[in-house]
Amino acid sequence: MSFFGKLLIVFQVLFSFVFMAFAGAVYTAQVNWKSKADTLQEQVNTANQQASEQATLWQTERSALENQATDLRDKFQTAQADFNNAKNELDGLQRDYDQLKTIEKVFEAESGLSKEEAEARREEAYRQREVNRQQNKTLEDLVIALRDAKDEIFSMSKEMEAMERKHVAALEEVATYKLMARANGWSQDPKEYARAQAPAPLVKGIVVQAKDANDRGTERLVEISLGERDGLVAGHELYVFRPAGLNQGRPMYLGSIRLVTVTPNRAVGTVVEKAKNGTISKDDHVTTQL
């Protein structure tokens, strides 16, 4: 084999190695490219998903911002309207103020009052206002006192009317009691009545005489040997009995009498209770306590 042939064989072997290396490189590049392509595709998908989520979030925030913008625009329009109204009112008040200032200036010019006179009048007005306040306070106090006095007078008048009614009723009762006392022959002197109501002292006496007060014998008068000096007054009641020495050795209860007339040494009473057996007569005994 010639040198050229050998050279071709060598070149062929070299080219074989080169082509093998190139094929390996191409294969390796193809495999690496697919892996990178898959990785990039996943990254793209992830980026698209994140972009979609961001778009949704952005759309939500955009809607919220648009709503806030709408609310702010409405509030701004309302505030603008309020501002315009306030400005119009302020302009009206300013015009009124200007008119008042003009009127004040005209009035000051026409009145010719100086600043000192106006201050003096203002002080006088303050003093008069204080005087009026004090007078009003005094008037209110007087009105309150007058109202209280009227209430007290009204209450006292009611009490007076009640007392007058009680007084009239008491007078009627006193008149009734006097009629009853007169009808029963009792004393109408309160002091004497009080003495009669007091318990009689323990005394003993004798019947001086006893007789009927009328022809029918329905009332019997008894005179006894006791009187005011013994502490007796009209209205006192005494018991009458006949001692054993005058009744065959046996004492006898004869009744009781109520004094109607009392003198210093004698007293006369009417029989208020009489026994079934026996009649009160001269020399019978009387006592205030059996």
Image: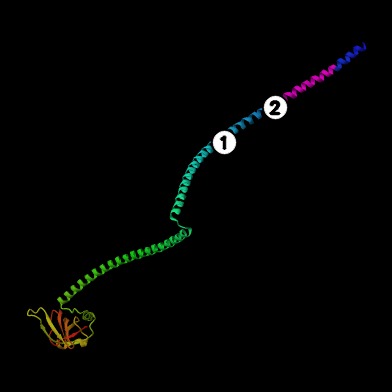
In this rendering, the answer to whether 65 lies above or below 11 is below
Location of mark 2 (residue):
40
Quarter of the picture containing the N terminus is top right
Q: Secondary structure at mark 2?
A: helix
Q: Which residue does the image show at 22% across and 70% down from the upper left? A: 168
View extreme (left): residue: 215
Location of mark 1 (residue):
65
Q: Secondary structure at mark 1?
A: helix
- N-terminal-most mark, 2 or 1: 2
Looking at the rendered image, the disc whose residue lies closer to the viewer, 2 or 1, is 1
- Report the span colored magenta: 15-37
Quarter of the picture containing the C terminus is bottom left
Name the residue nearer the viewer: 65 or 103.
Answer: 103
Q: Which residue does the image show at 70% across and 25% down from the upper left? A: 38
State yes or no: residue 251 in magenta.
no
Q: Which residue does the image show at 33% across and 65% down from the upper left? A: 146
Query: Left or right of 139: which side holds 172?
Result: left
Q: Local crowd at mark 2 within 10 Å, few (<14), some, or many (≥20)?
A: few
Please tell me in which quadrant of the rendered image residue 124 appears: bottom left
Q: Amino acid at mark 2?
A: Leu
> What's the mark number on residue 19?
none
